[in-house]
Image (tube, rainbow, N blue to C red):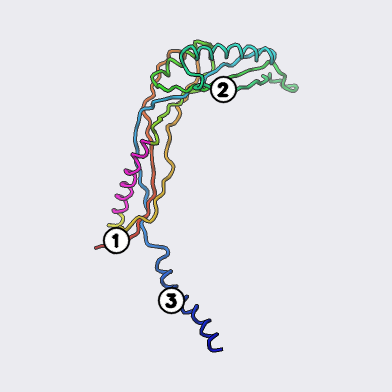
Amino acid sequence: MHHGRLRLALPLVFGFVAAPALAQSFPPPMISVTGEATVSAAPDAAQIEGGVTSDAKTAREASDANNAAMGKVLLALKGAGIPEKDYQTSRLSLQPQYAQNKSGPNSVTGYRASNRVTVKVRDVTKVANVIDTLVTAGANDIGGINFVVTTASKLLDEARPQAIADARRKAEIYAKAAGVALGDPISIGEGNFAQPVPMLRRASADFAAAPVAPGEETLHVNVSVSWGIKAAQ
């Protein structure tokens, strides 16, 4: 019986000793800040959405007219030297058009067929030429231009150390104000970063040969860093 009581007492002794150590280490004292960095770059590629919208009395007429018109657009893209892998259908629709009737249900007045392709332009200097090709071939629905920085990942890698340095700068300011010193980093996490925002333009009859300025895109990277703190030397 004496041995049984001794075995039961041992876990209680160890538990009592371990508890204060756990309480002292959680949560660890720390300073948490967010660092930021930006990098600018000129877009080196683009995506253009363009196509044809056709109206007719019947669905068959609208569809046939649209297919014929879109065929000319695709031939024009091919003739301009754009590889077939760089353009694909992005929207295809056939919808009835209605007239508003105050005294009864709306009536169908005709049909609208639409076919739009997305064109990848690997040389940003050729964007205006591609738009001119689309419109000249009969495209009457230019959805927009999306300029792209294809080296965004590499540029963001270059900005990440700058974001860490910015976070450390802020943390050191707080540590000095609080009368403590920074220890080792406890956690590092990256937040969302901004991708280039599409520049959208609507189509018009005189859109061909329009000047296009890609400008410059700014990429952002945010990082959250927590440092342990210790007594100042």
Q: Are marks 1 and 2 in contact (CB under 8 Å)?
A: no
Q: Nearer the viewer, mark 1 or mark 2?
A: 2
Q: Do labels 3 and 1 touch, CB within 8 Å?
A: no
Look at label 3 and name its amino acid.
Val
Q: CA distance from mark 1 to mark 2?
A: 61 Å
Quadrant for the N terminus in the image? bottom right
The answer to whether the residue labelled 2 contacts the one labelled 3, judged by CB atoms less than 8 Å apart, is no
Pick whichever of labels 3 and 1 is earlier in the sequence: 3
Q: CA distance from mark 3 to mark 1?
A: 29 Å
Q: Is residue 193 above or below residue 63?
A: below
Query: Which residue is identified by label 1?
Result: 180
> Dot 2 lies on which element?
strand
Q: Which residue is at the far right? A: 104
Q: Is residue 183 magenta?
A: no
Please tell me whether residue 23 is drawn above or below residue 102 in the rendered image: below
Which residue is painted at 43% across and 35% down in the image?
195
Quarter of the image with the C terminus is bottom left
Residue receiving disc 3: 17
Which mark is in front, 3 or 1?
A: 3
Compared across the picture, whether 111 is left or right of 7 comes to: right
What x and y, as percent, mark residue 2? 53, 89
Figure check: 85 above or below 152: above
Residue 164, percent across and down? Answer: 33, 47
Q: Earlier in the sequence, mark 2 or mark 3?
A: 3
The residue located at (63%, 18%) in the rendering is 113
- The three-letter code of the residue at mark 1 reads Val
Span of residues in magenta: 154-172
